[in-house]
Amino acid sequence: MAVLAARPLRPWVVAPTLPVLLAVLGGAAVVLSIFSLAISGAHLPLWPALQAAVGADNRYGPVIRNSQLPRVLLCWVVGCSLGVAGGVTQGVIRNPLASPDVIGVSKGAGVGAALLLLVLPTAPVIAIPIAAFSGGLLAFVAVYLFAYRQGASPVRLALTGIAVGAICDSIVRFLLVKWPIDINAALIWLVGSLYGRTQVDVLEVLPWMLVLTPALLFFAHRLDVLGLGDDLAIGLGEPVERTRLVTLLLAVSLASAAVAVAGAIGFVGLVAPHIARRLVGGQHLRYLPLSALVGVLLMLIADSLGRGIHPPLDVPAGLITALIGGPFFLYLLARIVR
Amino acid sequence: MKLTADSLVLAYGPKVIVDGVSIRIPEGRISVLIGPNGSGKSTILRALSRLLKPQSGQVVLDGHSIQTMTTREVARKLAILPQQSTAPEAITVENLVWYGRHPHRRAILPPTPADRRAVGWAMAATGMDKFRARPVDELSGGQRQRAWISLALAQETDILLLDEPTTFLDLSHQLDVLELCAELNREQGKTIVMVLHDINLAAEYAHHLFVIRSGCLHTEGDPPAVLTSDLLRDVFGVEARVMPHPVTGAPLCIPLRKVPREDRRPHRPAVVENGGSL
Amino acid sequence: MASSGSAATTSDVLPARARYPAGVLVALAGTGLLLVAAFWDLAIGARPLSASQVVGGLFGHGNVLDVEIVRSIRLPRVLMAAVIGLDLAMSGVIMQGLTANPLAAPDIVGVSAGAALVVVAAATVFAQIHGTALVLLGFAGAGIAAFGVLGLAGVGQGRTSPVRMALAGVTVTAMLLAFTQALLLLHQNGTAGIFFWLVGGVNFAQWSDLLVILPWTAIGAAGAMLLAVALNILALGDDVARGVGLNVDRTRLLGVLCVVCLAGAAVAVSGPVAFIGLIVPHTTRRLVGNNHLLVIPLAGLLGATLLTFADVGARFVQFPFETPSGIVTALLGAPFFLYLARRHRASA
C-alpha cells in the first residue's frame, strides 16, 4: 500500500499510528464537548446539564437543548469542515501557508453577510447564511476566473485569491462606513462567533459536511499526485486542471457552509492541517481525517474559552482562534524558511 | 506502440517556439533530441508527452491523437519524467515509486497483485530495491534520478520520455543514468526519447538523433550519419573535428573554436539517410 | 519572480534605466495635478466654496467664516493628505527595493496593521493620547511588525517569492486585526469612531498633527534619498551587492528604519490608509524606470497627489457627512492588486 512514512516528531518518540491518534484526539474532543456543555454565562452544574443533554427533563433542559448543545454540535461540524477544507486547499495550492480564506471564501462570505446585515437590515435572519454562502462561492469563482490563463497555476490562484480578498475587504469597509447602523453585529459576524446559534443552524450545515467530507476523501489519492507538480501529475494520467477545479470547488463549498453559519472564523483551516501533517505525514488520506479532528478541538477550545473567560461577555470564537492560531502560524512561518 | 508528431506548431502565449515539426519516433530504440539552448527541443518533448497543447498539428500515439485521449489513457502507454521534479517531503523510495501506479489504479480500491509486481519490478530494474525504505531526500543525485525513473517504469509503458535526465549530475552519475536507459532499452525493448545537452553522450547512447535548430527539425538519423563537422558548425556554431571514439567507435566531437554567426549556413539541408520525414 | 517590470529584475535596475526626461515630465504633471487636487479639496465640503473664496480664504481676505474654514479646517487636512500620501508611497518604494518583491507594501506586509494595533491598544488603555507619544507608539508597532514579517518571510535568506510574502502578510495582518478587534470588542464604547480610524483618513487633521508628523517625514524622506543608490545596487541581488562592496545588512536595517519612520508615523496620525504603498511605486516605476534616485521623490509626489484626490473622492461617498479617505484608496487599490497578481507568470 502506498503509505507515506509518518514523520517522527522526535527521534525518541515512537511515531503514534493513525488509529491511535484518531482515538486519542477523538476522545479528547468528546471529553471537551461534555465539559463545554456546562460552560455558560449562567452557571450550569455539569451533571444535570449532561442529563438534560441526553434528554432528561430538568430545569436546565431548555438552555442545554436550545443554546449549549447546538453550539457544541456546531463546533464539531464547523471545525471538521474547516479542517478538511483547509487541508485540501493547502494540497491543491501546494503552499502550506494557504487556507480557504486565501482563495476568497471568508472574505466573499463577509461581503454577502455585510450586504444583508447593513444594507437590508430587515431581511430575515435565515437569509444571512444563504447570502454568506453565495458570497463565498462567488468570490472563489471570481478568483478562479481571474487566475485562469491557460490553466490556473497554484501561484496565481494564491495571489489572485489574496487580491480578491482585498477587494472584498474594501467593499465590506465601504459598506460599514456607508451604513454604520449595525456596525457591532457586522463586526462580530466578520470575526466569527457561535453566539445565539440554534438547532436550525446545525441542520443547515450538517448535510454539507456529511456529503462533502467523504467526497473530498475520495479525491485524497489524486491530491497526493497533484503534490508532485503539474507536469509529473499529468504524466501520471491525472487531469490536473479538472481535479484542481473540482476539489477546490468542493473545499470552498464546505468552508462556505461553515462560514455561513459561524461567521468568518479564521486560522482553523490554516493551522489544523499543519498539526495533522506533523503528526502523520503528508498523505492526504491519512492527515485529512486528523485535520478534521484537530479543527473540532480548536473550535471547542475557542468556543468554550469564549464563553468562560469573561462571563457575561461572549467573546467571539473567531477572536480566540486567531489569538491561538496567529502565534502558531508565526512559529510555522519561521520554521518553513526555505 | 507508435509515437509520431505531425507538423507541430508550439507556442508559449503569442511566442512561437516550434514551427512545423514532424517527427516519427523509431520504435524500440533510443532517440535523443539535441540542439542549442532555446532551440525548442524540450518544448517538442513536452508536446510529445501532451504536457503542452500544440497550436496546430497533432501528436499521434498508437493511432489516436494524443489530445483526444484521456490523460489517463496516455499515461498507461507513455511515461514522461519532467526536468525537475520535487518529491514530497520525507517520502520513501518505495512510496514514490507507488505513484507510478496511479494511472492503473482506481480511487480508493486497494492495490492489486499486478500493482505490487510492477512496483517491485520497477525498483529492481533500477537497482533501487535495496533503498526502498530510504527517504528520497537522503539519496545522492544519481540515486534520486534512478528513483524517479523507477516511478516512470512502474507505469509499465512501452514509451519512456525523459527531459534532460542528466542535468545537475556529475559525470559518473550521468553515465549511470544513461547506462540504465540503454539497459532498459536492450532488455525490455522500451522506446526511449530523451533530451540531452551533451552531444558526445548523445552520440554514445542514441540509436537515432533528432537535431533541432531554432524550432525546426534540422536533421535526423543515426549518430555517425548525422554528427558531422558541417552540422556542428551550422547548428551549434562550433568549428569541430568529428572522429570515431577510440573505444566504442561512436562519433566523438572535439570542439575547436566558435564560428562567427555569418559563416553558418542558414538553410535546412536535406534529411539524411533513414530519416523518417513524413 | 520573473514578471517583467516587477520590483527589480536584474536586467532593468542598471542606473541607465533612469528616464530623466520622463522624470521631468512626471514631476511637472504630478505637481500640476497635486495643485488641482489640493485646490479642489479646499473648495469642496459641507460648505462649498468658490475658487475666489478659497483664494481669499488662503490669504485672509473675505468672509471671516470662510477664512476660518479654509485656514484651520481644510488647509491642514489637505496638507496632511499630501504628507501621508508621500510617506506611504515612499515607504512602499523602499520595501519593494529592500525585498526585491513586487508585493511588498506597508499594508500588505502587516506594518500598517502592527502600527494600528499598538495605537488602538494604547487608546483603549489610556483614553487620550496625542502628538509625539502617538507617533512613537506607531513606530513601535510598525517596527515590530516590519522586522517580524520580513524576517519570518525569509528576507535576507535569498529572494522571497511574492507568494510567500503575500501569504505571510495577509495572515499576519489577519492576526493583528483580530487582536485589534478583540480590544475593540472588550471596550465597546466608541467602536464606530475607532472603526473610522481603522479605515484610515485625514478627515479631522489639525495643524498640531501636521507639526507632529512633519519632522518624521523629513527624516524618513531624507534617509530614503540617501539609501537610493544602495537600493539600486541591492536590486542586483544580495550576492552581487556584497561583491561590489555594499553592506547589505546595514542597508536593510536602515531601510526598514526609514519604513518604520514613514509608515509608522503616517498610520499613527491618520490610520492605516490602504494601498498607496502598492499602487504608487508600481506606477512610478512604470513611468520613469527603476532608478531609485528618481523613483523615490516622484513616488512621494504621486502619493501625495493620489491621497489628495482620494480625499476629494471620499467627500462624494455620503455627501454632507465625512467619510474616511482610506475607503477610496482601498476601492482603487484592491483591483490594482488583482492586476498585479494576474500578471504574475505561471512559474512551476
Image (cartoon, coloured by chain):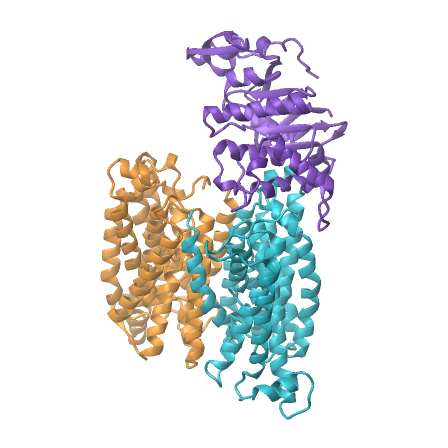
Chain colours: A cyan, B purple, C orange
Position of B238 with respect to A66 (left or right) is left
Closer-to-camera residue (C109/C311): C109
Closer-to-camera residue (B241/B205): B205
Farthest residue to the right: give it.
Answer: B63
Q: Quadrant of residue C188?
A: bottom left
Q: Quadrant of residue A273?
A: bottom right
Closer-to-camera residue (A235/A249): A235
Give the vertical position of C20 relative to A331 (above or below): above
Q: Quadrant of the N terminus of chain C?
A: top left
- What residue is shown at x 58% (from left), y 21% (from top)? B33
Picture coordinates of residue C183, whole percent (x, y): 41, 75
- What residue is shown at x 28% (from left), y 55% (from top)? C258
- What residue is shown at x 52% (from left), y 52% (from top)? A7
Q: Quadrant of residue C233?
A: top left
In this view of the protein, can residue A197 be seen by the observer? yes
Give the vertical position of C131 relative to B225 (above or below): below
In this view of the protein, can residue C42 be seen by the observer? no
Picture coordinates of residue B172, whole percent (x, y): 47, 24
Farthest residue to the bottom: give it.
Answer: A59
Q: How many marks?
A: 0
Picture coordinates of residue C217, whole percent (x, y): 26, 59
Closer-to-camera residue (C312/A5): A5
Picture coordinates of residue C58, whole percent (x, y): 27, 66
